[in-house]
Image: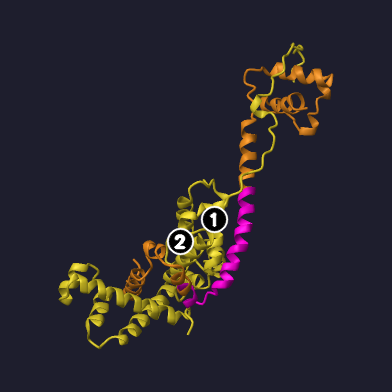
Chain colours: A yellow, B orange
Amino acid sequence: MSNAFKPVPLCPIALPDSAAEEPITPAPMVDFDQLFAHRGGFETAYMKLCVFAVDVIERRSGPSGGGAVVRTLDAKVVVADAFARVLTENTQWDDGEAVYRLLRRHIDNKIHTIQKSPVVARQVSLDALRANLDDEKAPDFPDEGAANPADQAAADEEESFYKSVLEATKPKYPAGGNEWKFIDLLIEGWRDRQEVCELLQITPEQYDALLKRVSRAAKAKKLEMLGKRKS
Amino acid sequence: MSKPRPNTDTARFLVDQSSLTEAQIDTMSESETTAYLSERGIDVPSLKAYIRALKARLTGQAALAEARRKRLSRAAQASIDLSSVSQDEIIAALVKKFGRIEDIPLAARNFRQMRRTDWESLYIDYILRP
């Protein structure tokens, strides 16, 4: 510190007015019934969000890995989590529809994240590490981008499960009928509506009806096999 | 390159096609909504009780979150600009308050080597906001 400085007359800086203490006014209470009035009120909106959450859970459920975790989710809790998240964001509470859509996105993103998250942590063999250190060589770790055997096993299990689902869906319909052919075409990779119509020699309207009933049957069979629905 | 999974891809395609659209959910009546949830093992009366309790809790949490935002906003506005004041003037004001430069509570701040920002902090705390 300098010893040569001299005291200087000083006019203290005045506090800006904005920094002065303001009276604390109560925060306005959010009326959730008013917020979702266009959706029938809070309870109705919440029930519809539960329907959406159930639908996403059914869609993203699977036999193993993250899909198996999704199966265990409680829809009403997923919706509550979405509300909790919205409360932590800088949400504008004057637009109920924007809040509703934001909640839907949070619900879908949350379930999607759980589905895609690894369930088992990647493991590194310490024996391999020790052996490499003993040999005074650089450790031979697998490449970061290499396939995880656990992920591959989960994918194989999933493939086997869905093969069973499709095979179990077929018997609902007459053997060799359009439903059977349709499923076989999908397995071969055909997705284009027009091309499938030509292959099956059906009209687009018949295709739409075919897709609707086969997809519902496959979903029902998937959920039955996952044990989700009541027997 | 990952192995092809035709059965997984096909089943997922079919399940996606059977998912409810936004319009379908929006146009569901109350009885349809109740039936949909009941078919999936959800006890609707319990769910409604859960919703009512949650609404009260969310209302309080929303008020708390809004109050917190207002407080943080006010604190940000209270930042003071001392760029027009020289360091000597700041030190002079502190010396005037404490009598001697040695009596300025630098030790309380564990300051070994004072920087401009340190002096400003002391000035704000001891001169502007006593």
Horizontally, residue A151 falls left or right of residue A93, namely left
Disc 1: which chain? A
Horizontally, residue B55 falls left or right of residue A48, namely right
Q: Residue at x 18, y 69 (%)?
A: A195
Front residue of A191/A159: it is A191
Which range of residues does the magenta coloring cover?
A: B36-64
Q: Quadrant of the N terminus of chain A?
A: top right
Which residue type does callout 2 highlight?
Answer: Asp
Dot 2 falls on a residue whose secondary structure is: helix
Rendering quarter of residue A198: bottom left
Q: Residue at x 53, y 59 (%)?
A: A42
Residue A149 seen: no
Q: Position of residue A59 (x, y in %)?
A: 41, 70
Is residue A212 a member of the stretch shown in magenta?
no
Q: Are marks 1 and 2 on the same chain?
A: yes
Front residue of B98/A39: it is A39
Dot 1 falls on a residue whose secondary structure is: helix
Q: Position of residue A157 (x, y in %)?
A: 42, 77
Q: Position of residue A118 (x, y in %)?
A: 49, 66
Mark 2 is surrounded, within 10 Å at the Cα level, by few (under 14), some (14 to 19) or many (20 or more) other residues, namely some
Q: Mark 1 or mark 2: name the one nearer the start of the chain.
A: 1
Horizontally, residue B125 falls left or right of residue A205, namely right
Q: Is residue A13 above or below residue A152?
A: above
Q: Is residue A180 above or below residue B86?
A: below
Q: How many marks?
A: 2
Q: Which residue is mark 2?
A: A108
What secondary structure prevails in the magenta region? helix
Rendering quarter of residue A149: bottom left
Q: Which residue is mark 1?
A: A33
Which residue type does callout 1 highlight?
Answer: Asp
